[in-house]
Amino acid sequence: LFSDLHEASEGKRRALEMNDLLFSAYLSSAAVASEEIVGRDLTLVDPLEGSDIHFEVISTPALDTRGERIGMVSIFRDVTDLRRANEELARNFGLLQQAESEARRERDRLDLIIEHVGHPIAVCDTNGKFILFNERAERLFKEAEGQTARAARAVSANSVKLTSFISALSSETDAGRQDEIELIEPETGVGLPMEITSAEVTDSNGQVTAVVSILHDLSEIRELERRRVEQQLFESEKLAAVGRMAASIAHEVNNPLEAIKNSLYLLTTKQSVEQNSLFLDVARKETERVSHIIRQMLGFARRSGEVEWINVNQLLEETLILVEKKFRQSRVSVARDFEAALPAVHARADQLRQVFLNLLLNAQQAIEGEGEIRVRTLRYGQALQPTISVRISDSGRGIDEAALARIFEPFFSTRKKGTGLGLWVTQDIIRHHGGRIEVTSAEGQGTTFNVILPVDSPTLTEADAGHAQQ
């Protein structure tokens, strides 16, 4: 570091001169220091490589026999590697802090995403222990203080099902698995059909560190599918109801047309004036009858789908006209017992007509041979919640207990050619009007259907009514 300058090259001499200057400056500062021993850092130049060399220098005064300072004794300790190690450590520490900060931001971002995802998300370690889940998953899998015994059992059962599902991942060829499992809603105990997707999380060495599971509630999807099927069934029954109504109208119109045809034929046979007048009068009356039926049908069409105040007695009379001929041919009579002061109801006329037509035709088909159908209307319920009752009774063979328990199920019918949809649709229409339908029957004693409707249905919305209409 301080050898003879004449033995060195130009570059080395410059390095040695620099070291001499730096050390001289150090000694000058040490000489004026009050301490007897001075320890300081000193950076010199490596004459061979030209790089910095860091030293820790300890200097103490050199004294003669009289105790006077005659110079300085200095000990050099090379700390270059230590200094570089410290700098590298500081740099790595800075990188570590930066990585930790970035990891914290990523964790916060992940937590934010997990919490705001609308589906339960749970993360388990390789032993099946939960290490992270969002609020929706926490409600299904985490035990909490104050939980009821039922809720605690449900949470425990859910956890077992999830861990069992995850444990099967080890036998899968892929790192993920998708299937359906049935969980339990802890608060209500209701079953929750879930679609679950689980995937393994691996580290940089390819080792599995955790398993992420995302669950999707299938209840809504299945409900939408159920409604879609219901709508298809409603459409099918609607077409069948239209067919029945068309057949009834055809029966009602055919009779007067036959009478008109016969009267016109007789007019061509040159009868007496009195007889011709009689034939013309018959043709006129039958024409008026056809006109009356058509006007009623037009009234039905105009009211279709509209929520309005309905005179139920009048609606029943209009519906009975449609089945009058069919009942007459079957030797079935109709006894009416209508309450004169029956309040109007807020409803959809076309839907109630479909209900009454279904019940009347069912009553007629239940009677073997001659019989009677009794149609009665009356007030029902309290003054604060006024309702009306429409009771349609038949003198038919009745319904046994087993069939009675399933009478409103879709596709269940006591007739060989029945679709099993009529009463199911009837019940749905009444429910959407805020009412209910009851049935009483005994074998050999006939059957009574009791339709109870609120005067002003609070549940009949446009959407509900439209659903029932379909």
Image: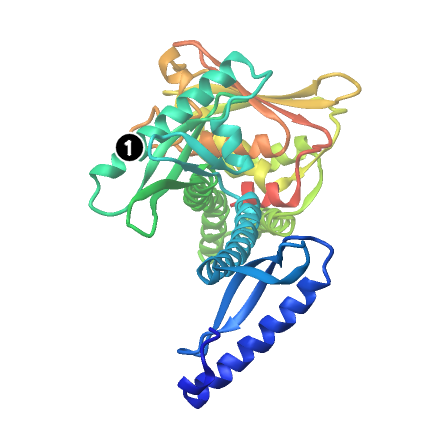
Q: Does the rendering let one see residue 90?
A: yes
Check the image and name the residue furthest to the front: 66
Q: Residue at x 44, y 42 (%)?
A: 221
Q: Which colour scheme is used?
A: rainbow
In-front residue for pair 224/293: 224
Task: Identify residue type, mark 1.
Answer: Ser
In-front residue for pair 287/187: 187
Q: Residues within 10 Å of mark 1 (few under 14, many from 20)?
A: some
**SS state under label 1:** helix
In-front residue for pair 149/171: 171
In-front residue for pair 282/23: 23
Check the image and name the residue furthest to the right: 384
Q: Which residue is drawn at 67% across and 62% down?
A: 30
Q: Residue 470, image x and y in percent?
A: 51, 45
Report whether 368 appears left or right of 296.
left
Count of numbered labels shown in the rendering: 1
Q: Residue at x 59, y 42 (%)?
A: 350
Q: Does the rendering let one see residue 320?
A: no
Report whether 318 appears left or right of 383.
left
Relative to 159, say whether 273 is above or below: below
Q: Residue 339, image x and y in percent?
A: 71, 21
Relative to 267, say whether 427 is above or below: above
Quadrant for residue 148, please give it: top right
Residue corresponding to mark 1: 167
Q: Which residue is drawn at 45% across and 48% down?
A: 258
Quadrant for residue 269, please give it: bottom left
Q: Residue 170, image x and y in percent?
A: 24, 38
Q: Residue 393, image x and y in percent?
A: 52, 18
